Image (cartoon, rainbow, N blue to C red):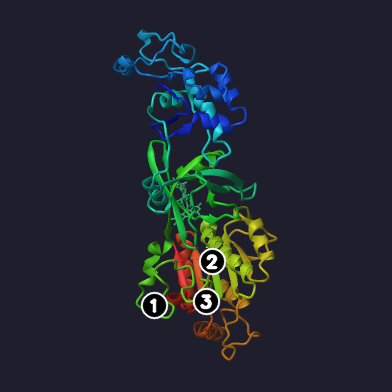
Amino acid sequence: MRIASGAQLVVAEGLLFDIRKWIKIHPGGAKILQRVIGTDITNDFFLDTSNQPKFTFGEIDQKDRDKNNSTSQYSSTLKKYDDAPNFDDSKQKRTILRTGSIANVFDVINSSSFKNSRVATHHHSIFATTKLASMVIARVDEYTDSPQKIQQSKVENEHVPHIFRRYILVNKEIVSRNDAQRPVVKLTFQVINVNEQLPEFLPGDYIEIFSHIKGQVLLRSYTPLQSDKDKCFSIIIRIYEEGLMSRHLMKQLVGFEIKVRGPFDISKRITANLNSPNSSKYYEPSPKHILLNPLSNDGCWDVLFMIAGGTGLTPMLQLIKYHLSYANQFPNRNFKLFLLFANETISDIFYFKYLDHSVATSNGKLKIAYLLTRPPPDWEELSGHINEDILCQWFSKNHIPDISSLISENESPILENSDYVKRYMQALIQDSRHIKLVTCGPPLMIDSVEESLNNIGFPVNDKAIFIR
Ligand SMILES: Cc1cc2nc3c(=O)[nH]c(=O)nc-3n(C[C@H](O)[C@H](O)[C@H](O)COP(=O)(O)OP(=O)(O)OC[C@H]3O[C@@H](n4cnc5c(N)ncnc54)[C@H](O)[C@@H]3O)c2cc1C
């Protein structure tokens, strides 16, 4: 394989670069090359055709070597760049590349040249380097963007949810307490190619992460959160001791690449609730993005109740972020968000700082109640399993429907006062504001929330969504 002046190389893996350009843009690029391949290289070196080196790549199978004998890959002129001058035919295959091999040159080029250009950077293992070096399949002398090429790259840039795309891990943050039995981590990913657009992630969107783990092909769903950083998104995942994907992701370091497809709309997973014969036409959500309000231009609800158990918090984080960023842009937009966050023990509560900060900066628009099934002795918030009583208290403490003739603020919102509960729910049904209740968490918790809501007469079919 020869590298001509200013040549670009195409490697089977898709690697493409221009050595001359690289030397120009990379401060000290010529020096790096010089150090690795041991000859004096300047920018002009590649321009002077008499200097064109005949690089030989490290690893070539004996079979390929025999096949390629006629084209003589082993020129005597630049044998010193060849990392196989003493190739021992009896060994058939060399396994280790020495420092200074041309394959190592490309490793250095890749890892240093693309470091600041949002391309995944990593040093290849010796095996990968060897393999890669033997995979060069072509050389491109001129690289011009033809109209077809431009059109093709436009099509490639269009976001097709079913196509897997690669993203790079740029931040990793533990968001659970130190004593958490199953830690929760926030992973932030960024697009690899600067020209790539990140899709807008809306409440109810989820993505699928693909991986090969322990010889298995794994695909797991996660809830993406739009990041404040450019072209980034985050996922918040709980790490299970036996969890294949969660443990695999937890192990990775910044710079790790993931394959992701999506976003997909959660609506498709919860159509069962929507097909209920009792669904009112007025509140029937649109078939897409059912977590958003189809009857308002901005998708925001006037009153949104959210009940989350454990990592069921993630779609609520999407909703909270969506609403609060709208309020930031349009401060006159009035709405109320109420979150009931249920966990087993205090150490299971995660993302607390973010939640606390959101409440503090929400201008009274967000209220959060914490519930623990196994609370510590000095716990002052809600405790026990979610039931009718807890729900009644939580509703009436937070929100008084605007049908003031049906209920008064001074009435006791306890379950024993069944007349009050009845009138409260009646008022909720007649309330002209757009009200929704979203629940997400472990299946048992969702079942018991649904049952309790039905028991107290909450308009489940019209105003509730259960994400299982
Ligand atoms: C639409 C959608 C969105 C999701 N979003 C998120 C998200 O944002 N964050 C997130 O952390 N997860 C989310 N999940 C769950 C996620 O897809 C995986 O199921 C989860 O990460 C476990 O995968 P795993 O490969 O680590 O565990 P697996 O290998 O599938 O499970 C192995 C073992 O892990 C334990 N385990 C796994 N899941 C649970 C569980 N739910 N409760 C208790 N023990 C469990 C069990 O011991 C199980 O036997 C979402 C799921 C869906 C369907």
- Badge number at residue 435: 3
- Badge number at residue 101: none
Q: Is residue 255 above or below residue 203?
A: above
**Label 3 vs label 1: CA separation?**
15 Å
Q: Foreground residue, 42 or 330?
A: 42
Residue shown at the point (47%, 62%) measured from the top left: 204
Residue shown at the point (39%, 8%) measured from the top left: 88
Residue contact between numbered discs 3 and 1, judged by CB atoms under 8 Å: no
Residue shown at the point (53%, 50%) measured from the top left: 237
Point out the tag, 1 or 2, that comes first from the N-terminus: 1
Q: Secondary structure at mark 3?
A: strand
**Label 1 vs label 2: CA separation?**
21 Å
Q: Foreground residue, 250 or 408?
A: 250
Point out the tag, 3 or 2, that comes first from the N-terminus: 2
Residue receiving disc 1:
279
Q: Foreground residue, 449 or 45?
A: 45
Q: Position of residue 56 (x, y in %)?
A: 43, 18
Q: Position of residue 404 (x, y in %)?
A: 59, 88
**Quadrant including the N terminus:** top left
Q: Position of residue 435 (x, y in %)?
A: 52, 76
**Label 3 vs label 2: CA separation?**
14 Å
Instruction: Identify residue type, mark 2.
Output: Ile
Q: Position of residue 436 (x, y in %)?
A: 50, 73
Asked whether the viewer can see residue 258, the reply is yes
Binning the other alpha carbons within 10 Å of mark 3 as few (below 14), some (14 to 19) or many (20 upward) gives many
Binning the other alpha carbons within 10 Å of mark 2 as few (below 14), some (14 to 19) or many (20 upward) gives many
Residue contact between numbered discs 1 and 2, judged by CB atoms under 8 Å: no
Instruction: Identify residue type, mark 1.
Output: Ser
Query: CB of residue at label 3: within 8 Å of ligand 1?
Result: no
- Badge number at residue 307: 2
Q: Is residue 174 above or below residue 135?
A: below
Q: Secondary structure at mark 1?
A: loop
